[in-house]
Amino acid sequence: MSTNVVRVPREVHQEAAQVAAMRGQQPGQLLAEAWREYMARHRDQFATELEEAARLMRNGTAEDLVAFANRHNRERGAATAERIRAKRKTA
Amino acid sequence: MTRPSALFGRPSAGSFISERWELRITRRCLEEDLGVSGDSAFEDVSQREIVKAFVKDRRDRVHDTRQVAPLTCGVPVWVLARGDDHRAATWYDEDEEVVWLLAYGIHRSGEPDDFFPDCKQIDAADRLLPVAEDYTRMFDERGERFVHAVRIEAPLILRAAREAPGEHRYMLGGEFGACITVEVDDELDAEAVTIAFRVDSLPFSHVSIVLAAFYADHAWEPVTRMPGRGLHAGEFAYTHTRVG
């Protein structure tokens, strides 16, 4: 199971906004296209995740489901902290 | 960011939940400045003078009249004051919709342990802003709130949507908007549930949970339109069909 892509990254948002402005489109339109492409490329992975979520919803405990929802949080926390550290002024 | 309205104005685990953001205290500040465990719940320190001020002054506004400056962290850090000498530093992370209490101390001008030089030293050591562990704990708590909320909400939303034809809009888990349509064919004894989400601010790891909360199987398929319309910019949708 993948441990990446938790959320449409900020850089993709910015890039989509720039490209959208050049094309006269809405950024959300490009993001949705990017999302659909991503989901098409990771169809099998998503199917596996959906199956696991459904299994936990039927037979698992609330704690199991929370653990599943939070499975990428360590990477996400590190990426967020890194984004903030990037704002630091260099001497 | 998973702020169910039932929690507005209340502490929840490491946060205080307001309508527009949440308030949190960094682990470093909890341990070193408030002298408690880094895993403390917000409620555990809610009677401290500075935490009372944090709730009172930051639940409705993220800025104040004066910044802690100069700092090297590259973000605006605001002074939070209580009485003559309680001082703290706060920062609003707009992307994650959270106001952090970063540092706390006593202000005594000219004395070696004055809050402001201490705060600048912490900043110079790159220890002022929240770290990965702070965010991971926040995301874990948000995930927990989300799961508990969506498990309760999904069956209620489904029932309401079955009773009233057409498209309905809901906030799931207090976090993200979803449009739902239920189509029923009595002749075939069939039902199709279609849900559209907006892409922005949607954690990938929550999509499968939301769909499974409505129908706990894997028969969901991506679709390119809602029953009564095309998808809006920034939307994507899934449908689930049950026959018999």
Image: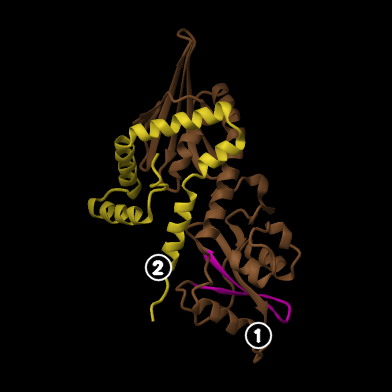
Chain colours: A yellow, B brown
Mark yes or no: residue B195 visible.
Answer: no
Quadrant of res A86 = bottom left
Discs 2 and 1 lie in a common subunit: no
Q: Is residue B127 above or below residue A41?
A: below
Work out whether residue B166 or residue A6 is closer to the camera in this orientation and state it. Answer: A6
Q: Is residue B222 above or below residue A7?
A: above
Q: Determine the chain carrying the residue at label 2.
A: A
Mark yes or no: residue B28 visible.
Answer: yes
- Closer to the camera: disc 2 or disc 1? 1
Q: Secondary structure under badge 2?
A: loop
- The span shown in magenta is B76-92
Please state the horizontal and vertical placement of residue B137, each as a whole percent of the image. Answer: 56, 54
From this viewpoint, which residue is outermost toward the top?
B187
Is most of the magenta stretch helix, strand or loop? strand
Query: In this figure, which residue is indicated by the disc labeled 1?
Result: B113
Within 10 Å of the Cα at label 1, are there few (<14), some (14-19), or many (20+) other Cα atoms?
some
Type of the residue with mark 2:
Ala
What is the number of the mark on residue B124? none
Query: In this figure, which residue is indicated by the disc labeled 2?
Result: A86
For the residues labelled 2 and 1, say whether their Cβ atoms are less than 8 Å apart: no
What's the residue at 45%, 45% (across, down)?
Answer: B202
From this viewpoint, which residue is outermost toward the left?
A23
Work out whether residue A8 or residue B14 is closer to the camera in this orientation and state it. Answer: B14
Q: Is residue B170 magenta?
A: no
Quadrant of res B11 = bottom right
What's the residue at 47%, 71% (across, down)?
Answer: B75
Type of the residue with mark 1:
Asp
